[in-house]
Amino acid sequence: MAPIPADRNTQFTVDREPLRNNDTLQLIQSKVRGPFTFLNPTQASYEHKIQIPPSRDHLGRTTAPLSTTDLVPPVGAPTPSVANIEYKWTARDNRKGRHTLVTKSPSVEHPDTNVALPQSTTHWRSILHTIWMMISFYPVWDISWCVAYIFTLGSLLWVINSLFVFLPLIRPSSTFHNEALVGGGITAFIGATIFEIGSVFLMLEAINENREGCFGYAVESVLNEYVGGTEIGDGSSLKVVPRDDACTHHHRNKTNLVGKPPVLDSEKQRSGKTNSWVWWPSWAELKNHYFHELGFIASLSQLLGATVFWISGLTALPGILNVLSPGLSDGIYWTPQVIGGSGFIVSGWLFMIETQKHWWQPAPTVLGWHIGLWNFIGGIG
């Protein structure tokens, strides 16, 4: 078993260091961080080290073809860092199968270490493309997508539930027979059940994080281009492009909801390892890793809260709620709502903390932080 660091939030254990098998990435130790010393890191950054091909005439024109699939330099070859990008790993992105490049201004001092980058996700075209994909693309094999849609559906049910229960109080003329009992009770049960299913999926997502991580991009040679009939470029510059086959997260498995991805990247092929799906980790993994993992703790809090809250959903059904005595109603209807809602509050707060550099520093520019915030507010509600 790998030794446990004294300050867990500033260093990874050997068997849990992300991207440890990727020879083109070097961990920036000073940027490994987490909000609490007794929990695992939630953020890390990597320098992208590649062999820059010669591009100056006085160095001689290179005629050797540049590999687009394996840019690991030979032993002894210079490996400068790419000056205008860093690769950012976060625990949340790793669970969701996402890959983040942090772009910087191109370096004037070292132009040979700059590479062409993908279009920024904040560009209006990227935003429109993302919105279109949300409308038209339904990856039902992706557990993270399922988690998002299940909780969205559950939240919609609770909005409908509030109309049945609250609307008669402010507009009595809209009331129909047994509106709160039947309409409110049935939607409460369905909504609580959906939340319970979503919480189970959330736990499966948390324990099937990609332990090694993957870069998700490939470095390719920029081919010569023709502008106005004139050839520009010498074929020696590089660009970073997203590549599905460079990702080993289970989200790429399109055959079924659970299981290993259909294509392994070069690191996996060299090591001969697979990324098998697990239904529950061992006790040793729980004790040494997952009980120190913010995402797992937050997901567990969500599951426990949803399970207790489901009791209120069950007892809200007509035929149960309307025959309960006041004491039983307090014990098995109202109390589970308070306890379950508290679990949602804790879960939302932990998901917010996971995306922050420090436990006290909000991260309003991070989408995951806002998701945790709304979960926190929903628990209070």
Image (cartoon, helix red, strand yellow):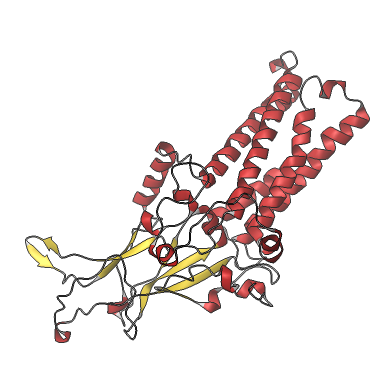
* Quadrant in the picture for residue 79: bottom left
Q: Is 264 positioned to the left or the right of 228 in the image?
A: right
Residue 380 visible at all: no
Outermost residue toward the front in this view: 272
Residue 92 visible at all: yes
Q: Is 196 positioned to the left or the right of 79 in the image?
A: right
Q: Residue at horizontal 77%, vertical 20%?
A: 318
Q: Residue at horizontal 76%, vertical 29%?
A: 314
Where residue 240 sits in the image (x, y, percent)? Answer: 32, 64
Where is the N terminus found, in terms of image quarters? bottom right
* Quadrant in the picture for residue 218: bottom left
Where residue 374 sits in the image (x, y, percent)? Answer: 63, 47
Q: Residue at horizontal 65%, vertical 56%?
A: 281
Vertical relation: 314 (above or below) 133? above
Vertical relation: 352 (above or below) 3? above
Vertical relation: 232 (above or below) 259? below
Please state which of residues 188 and 236 is positioned toward the viewer in this rendering: 236
Where is the C terminus found, in terms of image quarters? top right
Outermost residue toward the top in this view: 177
Where residue 213 sits in the image (x, y, percent)? Answer: 49, 63
Where residue 317 sits in the image (x, y, percent)? Answer: 76, 24
